[in-house]
């Protein structure tokens, strides 16, 4: 699944016309290149606002990313008054040292974290949910770990961390498509 992202600027507080123009450019550029419709949009910091959602609805884009609201767990929200759009609130790092960073190697790297720090959080994120968490998130929990090519794909210690994580946890992870990931919990 391709995410059209406004690199270089968050969508927060960008006026409607400017956001719409940028989203149309992202959408048409990617679709012209791939022939695949864009179904999720984002921007720097996974930032979005009510304007982003309005534009997504107008352009038939069903999903928008947003800053995380539930620590390491990713959460899907339905949007009141915008029945055709859902928000993917991405996984964040709950540790105070890395607070407000998304669960991404770049967030750790920029905050002087090490691959082992991220590996510990990724491993913790896969632990079974407590009864309290199940009441809040449903029986399935979702995480959105992310890598940046210039970190996880380029720096050997980070690449090794990712490879080790996937190798060790292969049996614990259920890969699903975007529509299933964004589906409502039972």
Image (tube, rainbow, N blue to C red):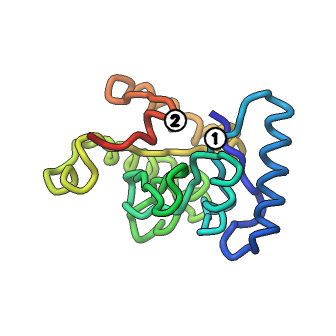
Element type where label 2 sits in the image: helix
C-alpha distance separating marks 2 and 1 = 9 Å
Dot 2 corresponds to which residue?
178
Q: Relative to residue 42, is residue 153 depicted above or below?
A: above
Among the 4 quarters of the image, the one containing residue 110: bottom right
Are there few (<14), some (14-19), or many (20+) residues within 10 Å of tag 2? few
Q: Relative to residue 87, is residue 168 depicted above or below?
A: above
Quarter holding the C terminus is top left
Are there few (<14), some (14-19), or many (20+) residues within 10 Å of tag 1? many
Q: Residue at x 77, y 54 (%)?
A: 23
Q: Residue at x 24, y 56 (%)?
A: 136
- Please state which of residues 105 and 47 is positioned toward the viewer in this rendering: 47
Q: Residue at x 20, y 49 (%)?
A: 134
Q: Earlier in the sequence, mark 2 or mark 1?
A: 1
Residue 3 lies, in percent from the top left, at 66, 43
Residue 126 lies, in percent from the top left, at 32, 41
Q: Residue at x 44, y 38 (%)?
A: 181
Q: Relative to residue 42, is residue 98 depicted above or below?
A: below
Quarter holding the N terminus is top right
Q: Which mark is nearer the camera, 2 or 1? A: 1
Residue 99 lies, in percent from the top left, at 46, 69
Dot 1 corresponds to which residue?
39
Dots 2, 1 in contact, CB < 8 A:
yes
């Amino acid at each position: 699944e391709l995410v059209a992202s406004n690199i270089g600027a968050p969508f927060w507080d960008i006026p409607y016309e400017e956001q719409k123009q940028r989203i149309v450019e992202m959408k048409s550029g990617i679709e012209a290149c791939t022939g695949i419709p864009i179904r999720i949009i984002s921007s720097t910091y996974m930032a979005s606002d009510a304007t982003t959602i309005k534009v997504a609805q107008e352009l038939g884009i069903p999903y928008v990313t947003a800053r995380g609201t539930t620590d390491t767990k990713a959460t899907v929200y339905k949007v009141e008054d915008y029945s055709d759009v859902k928000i993917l609130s991405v996984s964040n790092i709950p540790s105070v040292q890395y607070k407000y960073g998304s669960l991404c190697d770049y967030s750790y790297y920029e905050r002087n974290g090490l691959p082992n720090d991220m590996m510990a959080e990724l491993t913790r994120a896969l632990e079974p949910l407590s009864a309290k968490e199940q009441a809040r998130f449903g029986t399935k929990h979702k995480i959105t770990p992310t890598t940046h090519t210039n970190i996880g794909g380029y720096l050997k210690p980070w690449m090794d961390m990712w490879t080790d994580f996937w190798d060790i946890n292969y049996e614990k992870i259920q890969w699903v498509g975007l529509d299933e990931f964004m589906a409502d919990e039972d």
